[in-house]
Image (cartoon, helix red, strand yellow):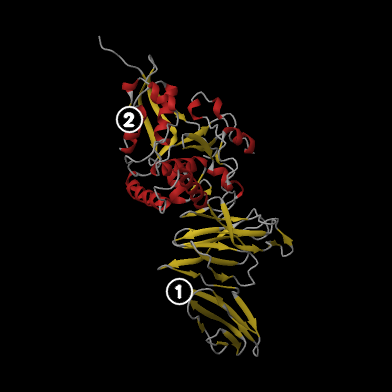
Amino acid sequence: MKKVISLVLVSIIVVSGCLFSPLTASAEDAKIHSFVPVIDSYYPGVEDYIAKALRNKEPVIDVSEYGISQNNIVYAFKSAVFDNPDIFYVDASQINYKYNKFTGAIQYITPTYICDFDKIPSMTKKFNKAVKSFLSGISSSLSSFDKALIIHDRLAVHCEYKQKSLLSFTAYGCMVEGKAICEGYSRAFCYLMSKLGVESKTINNTSALHCWNYVKLSGKWYNVDITGDDPKPDNEGYVSHKYFLISDSQLKKVSTNNNHNGYMDDATFSTDYYCTSDKYKNSFTKSITSEIIKYKNFYYYFDNNYKNKHVSALIRRQNGKKKVITTINDKWMYKHKYVWNGSYCKLCEKGKYIYFNSKRSIYRLKKGSKKIKKIHTFASYQTKDLYGISCDGTYLLVTRMKSSKKNPKTYKVAKFTSGRLTVIPYTRYSSANISKSGSFKYEIYGGRGKTTYKSSSNKIAKVSKNGVIRGKKKGKCTVTAQKSGYKFKLSVRVK
């Protein structure tokens, strides 16, 4: 008699932790604790088996030998993806499977790959390059606290909370594209911490549709929610530390949007991961809203409420004692008459220097010294103040706003070339009206070297080597200015 096995095809959407629709591990890599720890207890090896098949990009994965149930295959699959953030090309929220309708055991699963196979090798190179960049300068001798702090801040500064594509749910979206939602932040944090030898875990709160992390320091688990510490909308250089290394009890107190409620009630949650320690409850980091830069035994950061809400202090902290390097007393204005209730000095690092902003200027501080150099003060016509600063490796980026904090925009204001920082040239004007006997000074700010000028018609308007334009006769012409490889055009009308 021939035995007949009846299979049923099922397609399901796995509930994700957010409401928006590889480097090979070495012996030193720390464990990324299982997304759902009970799965490997009941079905030993199934998570690793699925992960290996996904790395081989298998279109259909045979799991019949495990006899795993329908409910548990969902957890096993998602654990395989979450616990291996370098498998960024698989949709963790969707899985198709076939099961035996008599026993209920899963026979095959069909994953959904979100990237073209021929693009994955180049994307993996970009991913590995990003990982190397995020880990740069972090010594293995640093404490687990320092490692967690540096990665927390770098991810918050680099990434914008935004869904660009399905990759925004992944570590790739967070580290390479700089666009991610909570799932992407948490998976990136886990992967980087594992490379630094620190144990971590992703928490998926299905009741509130939110993801964050647990990290293990000195045998104790702590909550870390980078999404909660990254401003929305994005603001260059802004990093809160409200959700950095806090206990479960603290998390309940500081959580303002119920994103963290109910996760301990999930049947898949293990009590092994309770965060009971309040060791860092009064850490100096809690009130800081700038990136905290670690250099040797120093921590550099801005205290943006030093004496009052309009005075910022650049602090260098060592062995629990802080020293003020400089203070900035500026008032950030909007609509030319109102004052924001706060100070917006931020800082970033590039090589041996720390860069920071005031309301209108950019400064440079050499690490380990007190020597400060003003790089540039933006021309007074610029009505958009600087609300933060960061570095993407090639450019210095600043945040500017017009009339509301709801519409911040990022601008590239300076470029690193061969180790030198050059302010990107800019100008105030795009057009000018002058009389036949009048003149106009066409200025180009920033950049290096001389500015060259040329008029399209010297008969209508002539321009000097210093940028002074003089009208000759009625008509229209264009004056072109070039500086540091940038070209500007001014429409001139002579009346």
Q: Residue at x 35, y 24 (%)?
A: 44
Q: Residue at x 35, y 17 (%)?
A: 6
> Is 170 drawn above or below residue 475 in the view shown?
above
Q: For mark 2, what is the residue?
A: 49
Disc 1 packing (10 Å; few <14; some 14–19; many ≥20): few
- Residue 354 drawn at (x, y percent): 50, 61
Image quadrant for the C terminus? Answer: bottom right
The amino acid marked with disc number 2 is: Tyr
Q: Which mark is residue 485?
A: 1
Image quadrant for the N terminus? Answer: top left
In depth, the one of 149 and 326 nearer the eye is: 326
Question: In which quadrant of the rendered view does residue 276 lie?
Answer: top right
Can residue 269 be seen at all in this image of the molecule? no
> What is the distance, in whole Å, between disc 2 and disc 1 at their CAs?
54 Å
Give whichever of discs 2 and 1 has the lower sequence position.
Answer: 2
Can residue 391 be seen at all in this image of the molecule? yes
- Residue 269 drawn at (x, y percent): 50, 26
Q: Residue at x 45, y 51 (%)?
A: 177
Q: Secondary structure at mark 1?
A: loop
Left of 348 or right of it: where is 81? left
Q: Residue furthest right?
A: 337
- Residue 345 drawn at (x, y percent): 60, 59
Q: Nearer the viewer, mark 2 or mark 1?
A: 2
> Is 389 drawn above or below residue 96 in the view shown?
below
Q: Residue furthest left?
A: 1
The amino acid marked with disc number 1 is: Gly
In depth, the one of 463 and 213 nearer the eye is: 213
Disc 2 packing (10 Å; few <14; some 14–19; many ≥20): some
> Is 439 drawn above or below residue 255 in the view shown?
below
Q: Which mark is residue 96?
A: none
- Residue 8 drawn at (x, y percent): 39, 21
Q: Secondary structure at mark 2?
A: helix
